[in-house]
Amino acid sequence: MNIILLHGSWHGAWCWHKVVPHLQASGHRVHVPDLPAHGRNWRVARGRTRLASMASYVCAILDQLDKPALLVAHSRGGIVASTVAEMRPQALRGTAYVAAYMLRNGERVVDYFKKDRDSLVLPNIRVNKMTLTDSLAEEAYQPALYADCSHADVELARSLLTPEPSLPALTRLRLTDARYGTVPRHYIELTQDRAVSIALQRAMVVNSPCQTVSTIDASHSAYFSRPRELANAILGMA
């Protein structure tokens, strides 16, 4: 099966490097893109990058595949996955949200983000109105994103994190039952998450019921701290 892994805010394809070998060892073809204005492409367009352009980038990958894919998204990447499901429902076997924003039609990340009182992101977010980007205060990296990760993982992330285009988080999703609603949804909960709290994760699952819900006792970055468990959860969906 084709599996596409989408990173979340401030990250890039690099964050999945521990998970990819486990999926490939099971015979799956794994595609791990840097979304526009992220990773190696982070300076391109930057604050002008919109949700539609991120989703179109993923759709271009889907259009080149010979079979439908399982689309796995982490954190803020969830809104990209949902938009892709609306644009290319026939090209997907399912969408899997890893502690990700799984929103309904008309909703936007910023509204949920402000209500997540158990998250350490809100008090530590830094918004640059000139560049239309946001970033996380460095002192919050470990407690908010990498609480159960090794020092080496934290230092790797510290060297690679980049500003996040803010416009996608301000964009209201446009989703329909006829398209997005036909793609099976799965959710992977991360119980120690202090970026997208477990309370918010479970509230989103109540709002948008899924075919399966898996639980991993990990922080927001389970791809670092629990890569095998995360890969096994994804394989269970595949």
Image (spheres, grey):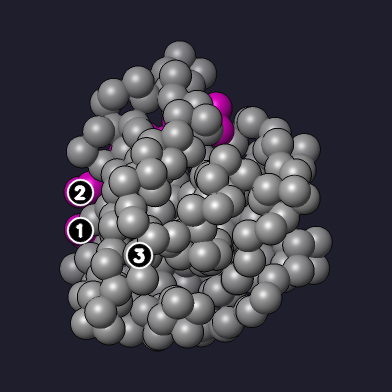
Callout 3, which amino acid? Asn
Q: Residue at x 77, y 50 (%)?
A: 177
Q: Which mark is residue 19?
A: none
Numbered badge on residue 156: 1
Where does residue 70 sit, x and y in percent of width and height?
46, 64
Residue segment shown in magenta: 155-168
* Residue 109: quarter of image: top right
- Which residue carries the number 2 mark? 159
Q: Secondary structure at mark 2?
A: helix
Q: Quadrant of the N terminus?
A: bottom left
- The answer to whether any part of residue 93 appears in the image is yes
* Left or right side of 21 for 2: right
Cβ atoms under marks 1 and 2 closer than 8 Å: yes
Q: Position of residue 129 (x, y in %)?
A: 51, 18
- Amino acid bearing label 1: Leu
Q: Nearer the viewer, residue 171 or 200?
A: 171
Q: Position of residue 155 (x, y in %)?
A: 21, 59
The residue located at (45%, 34%) in the rendering is 56
Membership of 102 in magenta stretch: no
